[in-house]
Amino acid sequence: MRRPMLKFLLVDDNEGFHITMKRYAAEKKISLQCVTNGDDAFDKLKDQPYSYDAIILDFNCIYHRGEKANRLFLGKFLDNLLNEKIHLPKAVLSGNPKAIEAQQFRTEKFFKKGEGEKQCLEYLVIQANKIEWTRTKEKYSKVIQIFDRHLDENHKEMFFDCIKNAK
């Protein structure tokens, strides 16, 4: 059975950049939903928490509708993801020179706009594929506890493949 298409969320106030990223995502068979601010992103994430596989964030973006973009966006957005217990792979894609300085303060992977778009998507595909097991463990926690006690890593992988193919 074919794996379903990955679905990423891009939060960037530059709507022209959405077109660029959608083109790159389509090349990699990734569905990319785009929003221009943090409020819209959280609306989507809260409405369908398991429908997204990763998030791409701008460094200097709009948080609340009607506000202007600012450098506080990234820290505030990441803190709110933690508060809401939304655990998804994340990457920052920014052309802002201050984003380079911020790399030392955050654990998210940073990519530079204009040269790192494809690498960002490739990185997130790898990270997104890792969260499938985590989500499966959450959904079938009691069953997984039994298998965790009795299966080695190879057999867990076989079990996971069975669950994916059964959907």
Image (cartoon, helix red, strand yellow):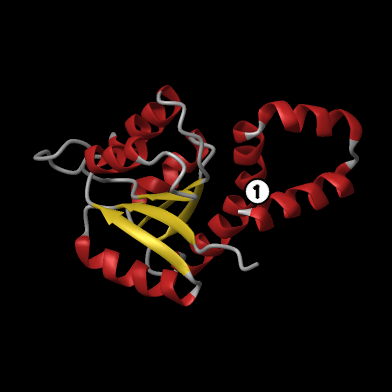
Seen at 47% across and 42% down, the residue is 50
Question: Judging from the image, what secondary structure is the residue with disc 1 in?
Answer: helix
In front: 81, or 17? 81
- Residue 130 rendering spot, x and y as whole percentages: 65, 48
Answer left or right for 129 relative to 51.
right
Label 1: few (<14), some (14–19) or many (≥20) C-alpha neighbours in 10 Å: few
- Residue 119 rendering spot, x and y as whole percentages: 53, 65
In front: 133, or 39? 133
Q: Quadrant of the N terminus?
A: bottom right
Residue at the left extreme, as displayed: 66
Would you place residue 52 above or below residue 86 in this image? Answer: below
Seen at 27% across and 38% down, the residue is 43
Residue under circle 1? 130
Answer left or right for 20 relative to 158.
left
- Residue 58 rendering spot, x and y as whole percentages: 33, 50
The number of callouts visible is 1
Residue type highlighted by circle 1: Lys
Seen at 87% across and 47% down, the residue is 155
Q: Quadrant of the C terminus?
A: bottom right
Answer left or right for 120 relative to 94.
right
Image quarter for residue 124? bottom right
Would you place residue 87 above or below residue 122 in this image? Answer: above
Would you place residue 155 above or below residue 32 in this image? Answer: above
Seen at 56% across and 64% down, the residue is 122
Answer left or right for 92 relative to 44.
right
Image quarter for residue 34? bottom left
